[in-house]
């Protein structure tokens, strides 16, 4: 059901048999606490549980520590990671009660500097922080984006975060592309991190997006089930044409059709990199404004040209079980002005 106010779509809510808590409060976080994440050595020690037994060593360590898998593989290659005091390969299958140990030295360049950047806080308590990320902002520092990130703003605004993923992405559980807006949840304790990330891994969360795609979809609803992996021709892109893809499932429902575009609500069952963008491009209906997949950055309607300055994709809602109350909670990020304006501009052609 669409919620409208003065012609603007505020949110798309999905009725369920269970009644989730719908949180739509928006405030600006004003707490300012400096966080020192300078040069230090951090030791990691993990005992493999029965649930994790049988996993590849690099996959297990990356998942439980929050560190990049590529970095874990480097540690293993350099013989700086041990299992029961022995060096193993990345492909080694861990067993229950194995003791995995390694240390990471964080250099001075790997610092997360607090920056006074306003953030749109949907919800916060002592376990989690949920924000509405604007388009144009990356989640955490990386080459080419060392400042102005969401996490630079978060450490400036919050007095505590999970240690997992430190120093550059403490508490980061999932990501959105730079030019995708919407709901992001960040863990403030290690317990909350593990509790929520387990829900992501076991597909207990529900993630819904709003998107504008080029062209008129014929089916009112459908499922796109195509593996997604690294492109064989361009390693910076993802593709459905790959021999090494992972299962990727996107369910969509048409909300409104225009003469040359379609407004859809998308529920992702999996969470692969660029999944929605790649899936819709693969069926011939790329996300409007996506300069990487489809390149449909403008539409000509008679004498008018509608320009889309970023991909028209918004993470509208996230439903999960709260780590403290254990209640199913739904966090909603109203659809931003630029997508609302695009919808209005496309609607003019219908009158």
Image: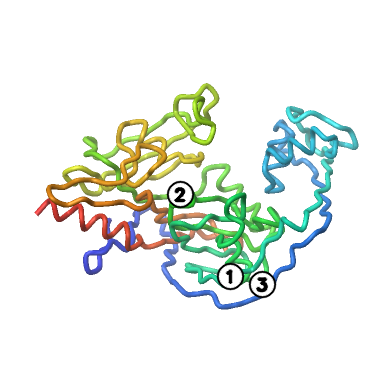
Tell me, yes or no, whether the two marked residues, 1 and 2, touch with CB atoms within 8 Å: no
Looking at the image, is mark 2 or mark 3 earlier in the sequence?
3
The CA span between labels 3 and 1 is 11 Å
Q: Nearer the viewer, residue 164 or 75?
A: 75
Quadrant of the frame with the C terminus: bottom left
Q: Please give the name of the residue rendered at 68% of the width and 60% of the height, measured from the top-left corner.
A: 162
CA gap, disc 1 to disc 2? 21 Å
Q: Which mark is residue 206?
A: 2
Quarter of the image that includes the N terminus: bottom left
**In x, y percent, where is residue 243?**
52, 21
Which circle's residue, 3 or 1, is located before the other in the chain?
Answer: 1
At a point 47% along the width and 58% down the height, the residue shown is: 183
Please, what secondary structure does the residue beneath circle 3 have?
Answer: loop
Q: Is residue 157 left or right of residue 95?
A: left
Residue designated by label 1? 125
Q: Is residue 299 left or right of residue 225?
A: left
The image's mark for residue 262 is none
Name the spot of residue 20 as percent of width and height, x first. 43, 60
- Crowd tier of the residue under label 3, counting other residues whose Cα lies within 10 Å: few below 14, some 14–19, many 20 or above: some
């Amino acid at each position: 059901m669409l919620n409208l106010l003065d012609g603007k779509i505020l949110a798309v809510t999905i009725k369920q048999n269970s009644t989730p808590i719908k949180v739509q409060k928006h405030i600006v976080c004003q707490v300012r606490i400096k966080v020192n994440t300078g040069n230090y050595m951090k030791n990691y020690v993990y005992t493999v549980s029965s649930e994790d037994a049988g996993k590849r060593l690099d996959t297990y360590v990356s998942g439980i520590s929050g560190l990049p898998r590529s970095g874990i593989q480097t540690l293993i290659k350099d013989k700086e990671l041990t299992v029961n005091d022995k060096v193993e390969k990345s492909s080694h299958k861990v067993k229950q009660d194995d003791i995995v140990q390694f240390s990471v030295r964080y250099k001075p360049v790997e610092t997360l500097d607090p920056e006074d950047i306003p953030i749109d806080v949907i919800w916060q308590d002592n376990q989690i922080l949920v924000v509405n990320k604007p388009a144009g902002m990356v989640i955490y520092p990386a080459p080419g984006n060392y400042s102005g990130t969401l996490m630079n703003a978060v450490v400036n605004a919050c007095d505590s975060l999970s240690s997992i993923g430190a120093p550059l992405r403490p508490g980061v559980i999932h990501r959105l592309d730079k030019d995708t807006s919407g709901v992001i949840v960040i863990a403030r304790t290690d317990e909350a991190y593990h509790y929520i990330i387990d829900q992501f891994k076991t597909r207990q969360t529900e993630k819904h997006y709003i998107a504008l795609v080029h062209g008129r979809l014929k089916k009112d609803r459908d499922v796109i089930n195509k593996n997604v992996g690294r492109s064989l021709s361009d390693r910076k892109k993802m593709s459905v044409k790959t021999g090494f893809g992972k299962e990727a499932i996107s369910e969509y429902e048409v909300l409104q059709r225009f003469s040359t575009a379609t407004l859809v609500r998308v529920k992702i069952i999996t969470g692969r990199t660029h999944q929605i963008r790649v899936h819709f491009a693969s069926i011939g209906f790329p996300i409007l404004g996506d300069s990487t997949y489809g390149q449909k950055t403008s539409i000509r309607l008679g004498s008018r040209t509608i320009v889309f300055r970023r991909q028209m994709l918004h993470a509208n809602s996230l439903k999960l079980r709260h780590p403290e109350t254990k209640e199913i909670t739904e966090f909603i990020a109203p659809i931003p002005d630029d997508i609302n304006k695009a919808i209005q501009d496309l609607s003019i052609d219908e009158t």
